[in-house]
Structure formats: C-alpha cells, structure tokens
Image: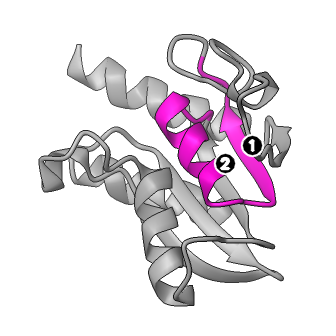
Amino acid sequence: MERALEEATRAAARGEVPVGAVVSRDGEVIAAAGNETLARFDPTAHAEIVAIRLACEALGSQRLTGCDLHVTLEPCAMCAAAISFARIRRLYFGAGDEKGGAVEHGPRFYSQPTCHHAPEVYSGLSETASAEMLRRFFDERR
C-alpha cells in the first residue's frame, strides 16, 4: 500500500485527485499508476484502470489471474467492473468511499448475482493516510 500512496501523492502533485493503484503478483510490482483523468482528458483514466491496462500490457494478457490490486480509495462501479473482468485475485483498498464507492458502499458490485468474478476484498489498509490525503487535497480547492 505504501507504493499506492506514493502514486497518489504524485497524482496530487499533477493536480489529479490523489488516488494510487498498484498491481502485483507474488510480491512483485507489475504496474503502478495514479489518477490521470485530467492529463489524458479521459474520465476512465482512474488509477485502477491505468494500472490494470499497464499490467495487462506488461503480461501480454487481458486476464490478471493471480494478481493483486492495492488502491488507496474504494473503487467506483467502473473500476470494480474492470477489476472483475481482469480477474484480479485480491483487492486491497484504503479509504472507503460512501459517495462513489461500489465495493462496500453503493451498489456493492461483487455481491450482485450478475458479477462473474469477485476478488477477495480487504479494506481499511492505510485508511487514515489515504483519507487524510484526499481530505487535504479537496480542502485546498475549496
């Protein structure tokens, strides 16, 4: 999660919402990214999506079987679906997101009968650091 927090810090420095994500397998980092929605003019360039795309490219596969994803914020519905489609083994996330989250909040994507693959989910990792980074970022813009 430390590397995901570093990616979130880099995203904030670029003016992006500070969310970072890391894909790993057997303890080895395959891909890491922060939000890039502003830089790419792409509303789908969330940290999770960018990291998944980079990992798929690095591994030459559309499936990330056996891979884990660490992300600083609870994934939204779009990212939860991408995680499922990529067949991520385990999802670890920091801060919960009551407003936009889709794993433990909102639609609870992985609990739906239409979800084909649900990763193991572990929440609350580095929750305080993740939430504080987001809080500071948005306080500075208000």
Nearer-N-terminus badge (1/2): 2
Residue at mark 2: 84
Whole-percent x and y of residue 93? 70, 43
Q: Nearer the viewer, residue 14 or 42?
A: 42
Which label is found at residue 116?
1
Viewer can see residue 1: no
Residue stretch in magenta: 74-97
Q: Residue at x 58, y 36 (%)?
A: 75
Viewer can see residue 108: yes
Q: Residue at x 71, y 20 (%)?
A: 108
Q: Secondary structure at mark 1?
A: loop
Label 1 sits on what residue type?
His
Q: CA distance from mark 1 to mark 2?
A: 7 Å
The answer to whether the residues at label 1 and label 2 have Cβ atoms under 8 Å apart is: yes
Q: Quadrant of the C terminus?
A: top left
Task: Determine whether 46 is above or below 70 in the image.
Answer: above
- 50 displayed left or right of 123: left
